[in-house]
């Protein structure tokens, strides 16, 4: 399959990339290209201009700084998988990176692209919702921050402006007794989730939940934040009864579409089961922290 | 739509071409350079038959633009053999019957080759994980794993 014709630009700086985006109304940002190029090849989407940001310096990093874990927008999934810092302190992120597409795709695929694509079937959106992340968008007027729960505005739509580039993701730094997990049910490596759940828990001195983040993948037209389940867990011990009830509430918050991966009832049930597993694993990790 | 002059080092040799923006790397390799060892399978980045190394890392060349390879190093299956001698990964597939129809083989070998560059003693799990983005429809995964192990052993023996 051959994409429809477009012009290609490979700017050497962020300012130049933003200027090109502003200049061409039908331009798209090419980061890892692992979603965009298939989309263009299948002609589900089109672009008059591709602005390749792979020559822009300083967009790939993973570091803790000023109370945040900061991840550069063009950081490859493979780098997240390999990072010691992520592995030790943010295992929910290595859980997520490891189940995105396949190892070869992950050599190019980027975390910024996974979010900016706005696909509710992508895996990072749920994880970022559970973590309460912030997205940094850079445009003509400089940087602005967008809370992740305001970022996904519709199917394949985000709060990013046309001439803005997702340059960084900020995650509150792991502290105290906190832990998270991402679990995904997929038919085979490389498939989108039949169901996927991200859970992040912070525990107080008595082992009670002081903060809960729960979000679901491919369970509606946008990534779903399970606000009722999060609220329910507040102040409770993460025991089987509380987790079971929260999982029911999380499954109730979803609106999955029937497809070859299953019908609505099956998917809702899998969302409940996976929420139980994600919360159990998150609690174990928080207790071990 | 402007064309781009690109210069790519393919299997150690400088190659040039004038390409449309939309030309995929796999078509540049197969149709402009006539390196037809790299196969096109699913064409949707699932099957891995088109796997080549870009600056040493395996990528699916149906999901990379040729113009993105400008100034970079590409290694294809044709780059494995040296002076008429098969690379251990090729020898491994030959000895262990790692192929039936052979369609997935170039991609499998490039992925296996890349794995062995960073992991000289891969476990069966490491190999299965590495090739999880390469599909074989002759159900030959058992022998493919053996082929990569065969290559790992041969490479370790040649270092000694």
Image (cartoon, coloured by chain):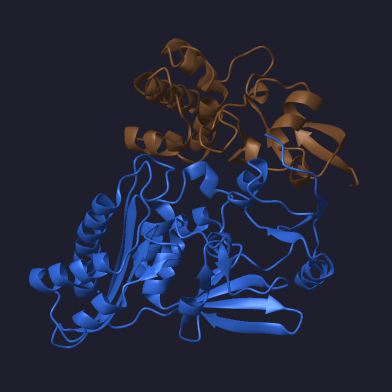
- Chain A drawing hue: blue
Residue A173 rendering spot, x and y as whole percentages: 41, 80
Horizontal side of residue A54 vs A124, given as left or right: right
Q: Residue at x 32, y 65 (%)?
A: A254
Horizontal side of residue B119 vs B1, given as left or right: left
Question: Where on the picture, by quarter, is residue A3?
Answer: top right
Foreground residue, A175 or B123?
A175
Q: Residue at x 40, y 62 (%)?
A: A220
Say whether residue A182 is visible.
yes
Residue A37 rendering spot, x and y as whole percentages: 65, 47
Above or below for A281 versus A164: above
Above or below for A99 versus A53: above
Question: Where on the picture, by quarter, is residue A14?
Answer: bottom right
Q: Residue at x 53, y 59 (%)?
A: A114
Above or below for A114 versus A107: below
Horizontal side of residue A247 vs A262, given as left or right: left
């Amino acid at each position: 399959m051959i994409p429809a014709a477009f012009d290609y630009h490979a700017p050497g700086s962020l300012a130049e990339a933003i200027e090109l985006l502003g200049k061409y109304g039908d331009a798209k940002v090419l980061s890892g290209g692992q979603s965009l190029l298939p989309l263009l090849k299948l002609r589900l989407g089109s672009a008059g201009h591709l602005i390749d940001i792979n020559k822009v310096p300083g967009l790939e990093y993973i570091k803790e700084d000023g109370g945040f874990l900061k991840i550069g927008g063009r950081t490859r999934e493979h780098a997240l998988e390999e990072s010691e810092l992520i592995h030790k302190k943010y295992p929910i992120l290595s859980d997520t990176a490891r189940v995105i597409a396949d190892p070869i795709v992950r050599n190019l695929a980027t975390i910024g692209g996974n979010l900016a694509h706005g696909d509710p079937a992508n895996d990072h959106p749920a994880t970022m919702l559970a973590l309460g992340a912030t997205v940094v968008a850079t445009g003509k007027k400089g940087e602005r921050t967008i809370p992740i729960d305001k970022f996904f505005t519709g199917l394949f739509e985000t709060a990013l402006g046309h001439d803005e580039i997702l340059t960084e993701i900020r995650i509150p730094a792991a502290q105290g007794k906190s832990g998270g997990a991402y679990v995904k049910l997929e038919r085979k490596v490389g498939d989108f989730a039949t169901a996927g759940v991200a859970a992040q828990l912070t525990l107080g001195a008595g082992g009670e939940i002081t903060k809960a983040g729960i979000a679901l993948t491919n369970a509606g037209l946008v990534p779903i934040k399970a606000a009722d389940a999060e609220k329910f867990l507040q102040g409770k011990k993460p025991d089987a009864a509380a987790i079971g009830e929260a999982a029911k509430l999380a499954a109730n918050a979803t609106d999955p579409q029937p497809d070859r991966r299953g019908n609505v009832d099956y998917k809702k049930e899998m969302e409940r089961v996976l929420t139980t597993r994600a919360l159990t694993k998150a609690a174990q990790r928080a207790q071990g922290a | 739509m402007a064309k781009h002059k690109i210069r790519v080092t393919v299997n150690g040799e400088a190659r040039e071409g004038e390409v449309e923006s939309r030309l995929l790397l796999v078509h540049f390799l197969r149709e402009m350079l006539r390196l037809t060892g790299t196969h096109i399978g699913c064409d949707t980045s699932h099957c891995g038959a088109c796997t080549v190394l870009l600056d040493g890392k395996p990528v699916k060349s149906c999901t990379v633009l040729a113009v993105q390879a400008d100034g970079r190093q590409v290694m294809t299956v044709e780059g494995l053999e040296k002076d008429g001698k098969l690379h251990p990964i090729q020898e491994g597939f030959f000895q262990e019957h790692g192929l039936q129809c052979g369609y997935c083989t170039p991609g499998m070998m490039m992925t296996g080759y890349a794995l062995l560059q960073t992991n000289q003693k891969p476990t069966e799990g490491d190999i299965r994980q590495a090739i999880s983005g390469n599909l074989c429809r002759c159900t030959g995964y058992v022998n493919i794993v053996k082929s990569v192990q065969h290559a790992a052993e041969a490479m370790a023996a040649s270092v000694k």
